[in-house]
Image (tube, grey):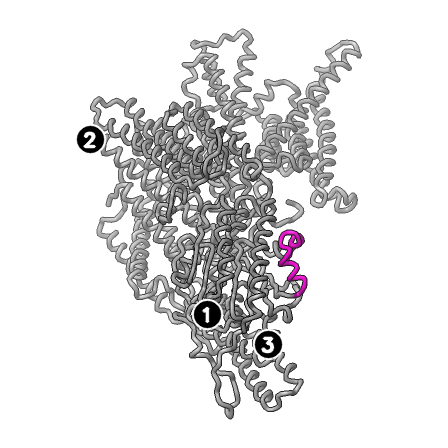
Amino acid sequence: MRIPHGCFLILCLAVQSLAFYIFFKGFFPVKSAIPGKATFNNLPAEPLPHSMKMKNEPPKAVFGRLVIVLVDALRADFVFGNKADQHMPFTSQLIKDDKTLSFIAKAHPPTVTMPRIKAITTGGIPGFIDIVLNVDSSALLEDNLISQLYSANKSIVFYGDDTWIKLFPNHFRRTDGTTSFFVADYTEVDNNVTRHVDPELENTDWSVMILHYLGLDHIGHLAGPTSPLVGPKLQEMDKVIEKIYSSVTKQDKTSDLPTLIILCGDHGMSNIGSHGGASIGETTTPLVMMSTFYDKFGLPYTASEIQQIDVASTLSLLLGVPIPQNSLGRIITMQLSTMTTREQLRALQLNANQLMNVLATNVNSLYTEPSYLKYNRSVQLHASWLESYLQEADNINHNVLGKKVITQYNTAIIEMSNRISASLARYDEYAMVIGTVLFWQVLISFLYGAWQLNGGHMTSISLPIGGQSSIFILIACCLATTSVHINICTDTTGTPSEVLCNMSIPAICLSTVFIVSSSFTLTVLIGQLGKIPKHQVGMYIKTTQLMTGQWTLIGGSVLHTLSLVSSSFVEEEHQTWYFFTMTINFYFFYKTFSLILNKSLLIGSKSSAKIDKSDCKYDELITKRCGEDEIDKCAMSADEVFVGNMRTVVAVLIVLLCGRLMRAWNQTGMKWADRPDIGDWFVRPENKIYLSGMVIVSHVVICIVRHLRRQFSLLLVLALIGVYYYRAVTGIILLPWGSTVPSKGVYEAWFVYAVIGVQIFRAIYIAYMQTRKTDENINTYKQTLVDTLECILTALIVLSALLLRPHNSAVLSLLVLEEHFLTTVLWRAYLSRSPLWVITLLHLWFGSAAFFTQGNSNSTANVDISAGYIGLDSYIPAIVFILTLMSTYTGPFIFITSLVTYTARHYADRYQDSLVYICYTIAVSRALPVAVYLVLISCQRYHLFVWSVFSPKLMYEGMLTIVYSIIILLLTAHSNLVRKFVKRE
Amino acid sequence: MAAAMDLSSDCLQQSLSIRSLFFVNFGMGVFVVMFHLIPYLYLNEIIVISSPLLAVKWFCILHSVLQVATYALIVKKQNPSNKTGSKKSPWRNLCNKINGLLKYGLLYFSSILLFHMIAVLYGAPFSESVEETFKLSTLLATLTTLPCMCVIGLDADSWAQLFTHNRPVVGIESCLQQTTVMTLVGAWLGAFPIPLDWDRPWQ
């Protein structure tokens, strides 16, 4: 059976993505929530003795109104730290006077706004997968505090981050949303919230007011927590709180119940101002509860820690609404101390009962759970305490005994909560294994295809399927895998896999794919193993002897793959890539200088050497002695040789310097990420003028480099001016002439998009004209190919210039510079005889390094989502996704395009086959680390850092695989198109 | 440093005429081992792990002295006729010697600078911890440039030959090449696990 390479690749990629899907489903568990909303109807009764009448009362509300001031990225030390006296004088004075209840609330990672809002309102721990949905927030269906307040007929007003409006549609009486995607703006976004505060404070029709301030988070993203902008922002927040507190205090004098004001943060910020991970800075947020009520009952601040998820249950209790059904939080103990013992016990009982219900849906056998037994015991103690309490109400001993019951309840609550969170992190191990196995099959298929291609099967690969025996084997394999699969699925000892063993249609489809794929792979393997005699394998290895440099490349890839075992290597993956690319640069450095030394040596030894065209023996000698891949040396004169050498020297030095500079531009990773870097310096507000200059210089450099490639055009200049103007209009950089009205720059961005569109259209037009020409000549054919691809490369560069953050313009220009000198000088000088896979691998390596130089890392915090909104007025998911993808993976995209251009330039005569070859190289070099990584992450699923380090890395690997799959698809399509046209002519 | 060890076995297979070379390298190997072991018994302040800077400093000094001494012995033994031929005034001789010494020093120093530059390009901080980087480059220069210098001298041709030949003459040249390459490979491998955050002193 023969399959064309293109079909085979597409088939493999499809299976690969399915394998990823299965693994993801198994690895990121989805918790089972109780549907519906909690009500007071099914509350457990207070465990009174039987003689008493059963009363089923909900606890009484303590507060009548609630004001939540949520400051995005408010870190605990902003409120409790040393500088709090200056930055937040009013709040810290209240805390000092013991008129508040203040805690450090620990947030669960991922520390991103939407999961955190969900955690605060539902009391649940959002799964890791929620981070993907962070951008695309849809209505929250789970039971939550806001819905409970809404059903309790409390009118709610909300101002701030519009995530809330999307999460709780129609819940708010009055609202004004601000979007969080214009990170550069940190004043307007907060003024839009504050301007509503005064009118609302005069209004009396609301009972819950929520304010979500985004400015601090934006400052953090722009300049970090140590920025001078943070202080004034905190003072502004403090003013708001003072205003609310004073007017609410006045109003409380006339109302029955006091008003509760809460100051909290959704997450903190790391030392470089980002968030998303699990570092201490990111997870510690303050929780300050202020009210006239606490004038009496306030407690001194002791830096005691609570969980952020505790807020939901505590607030429910205080406001007299049911605790959200799926909450995992527990009522804050210090809050309880303001109540009588009986009330406390009742509150704890309700909390424990609610947790017990959640536990019941998440474990298989509730009645054997140790935490459930503890709960039962607590209820019994509670009952006996009540009995004795009702008999002699004024006994002092009751308090002491009551304390014991409270402790008992608390342990039960903690244990149940822990048990539930543990069960949420339950992996579907069978799905993980199947996903991994499937992925390895894909890797083997890629290797098989590459092997066939190497063996001379250029257009299609032959599968040893078709004979009677092979069909028999195929059926046998199919039956075997099916029986194993069904056996495991129907096994009664463990819980069957949700993803694969269900009777639902997707599960059956996935299982079928797995069975078919494995039986095919097995058949091919068996068929091939039978066919190849052993001595041939030895021959194969012998004939494909590799040079030292090539071994180094393979060794580097393997080393990188293995380094993913360690969490620190994953965090600091950029170091690996910088190290590798620098080593390659130094290899060229060494080659260049040894060449020059040798040449000067030879010339020196022959003192009267007049090297001219006839003197090519010397050059031959040089070539031989150096073992170099120089080809056309004989045709060159001494001057030309000298110029050529100088070009290489300059290229090597520039590439070395570029590599070093780009590395220093953005510190990334974990450990050294907060070191000051060049990019940070440019972002500082006082350096705006330097930033503007830098952007201009980088644009000029891009123009020069494109000019060197003979790709300089008016379109490019227009586009770059458009980019500059766009940045100036958004207020990030200065215009050389006057100032502009700040705006979102939608028209400017669209101008750039239009120019890019024209550029791409031009590329297609060139290609189209070529197909209509009849005088077929390899040179013109090659020239059109190169021109088309260069046009696309230019378009890509311009697009990146628009999408990347302003301080990264320099990184882009360095990238373009590096790419130019690598491909036009160094590759040509040293790699013209190397196989294409070497060049492909090098491009992949440099692409990976470039990915990190623009400030990306393997942590979810570093994705620049704002790029997706450039030129957009509203949120269009598909476009936002594509733009974000383009800006994040600028480096890989540019290097792959340049690889194709290089191929067109130097392998024009067998262009289509080279493209297929490149596809296989990319596929294998991508599948290998991922296949190994899937095994690693499965082994380390109970590792401490699995959520903070390994899972984000898995996401990135998945994303990168998708990106490269798209690239492979495009290349395959391109190759087929070219083939069609060439055939026709 | 491991390179020196590697080398002794490597040179075993070489011809007998360079038996002395084997002894030199064996001696170096012994020295390296001793240098690491002795401080644990006494001289605790130069244990490599606890005080790397000081230890590297002393290692460089001792190693270079030892090397210069031993190589001087060998080179003199191998071609004793070279030096005796010159019958110039002692003053001239001294001048020459000082001149040569200066040149050697310059070469050594520039190789240190080269290694320093390479380290910075590889990502060592540019303005911070300059001393550490400098010590590292001194160490590398001591292990690679110094032996070559002792054997080859200042002859540019031989230098070029040494580093551009893929298969040098078996003997002292291949030995030197092996040392250099192994040292650099060792340094490369040693730099790879820097991102690990085990925070152990040996890192």
Q: Which residue is mark 3?
A: A339
Relative vertical location of residue A744 with respect to residue A633 in this rendering, above or below: below
Residue A664 seen from this side: no
Left or right of A365? Residue A267 is: right
User: Closer to the N terminus: mark 3 or mark 1?
Assistant: 1
* Residue type at numbered disc 1: Pro
Relative vertical location of residue A44 with respect to residue B131 in this rendering, above or below: below
Disc ID at residue A324 = 1
Packing grade of label 2 (10 A; few <14, some 14-19, many >=20) is few
Magenta-drawn segment: A80-98
Percent position (x, y) of residue A971?
A: 32, 38
- Label 3 vs label 1, nearer the camera: 3
User: Closer to the N terminus: mark 3 or mark 2?
Assistant: 3
Residue B48 seen from this side: yes
User: Closer to the N terminus: mark 1 or mark 2?
Assistant: 1
Q: CA distance from mark 3 to mark 1?
A: 22 Å
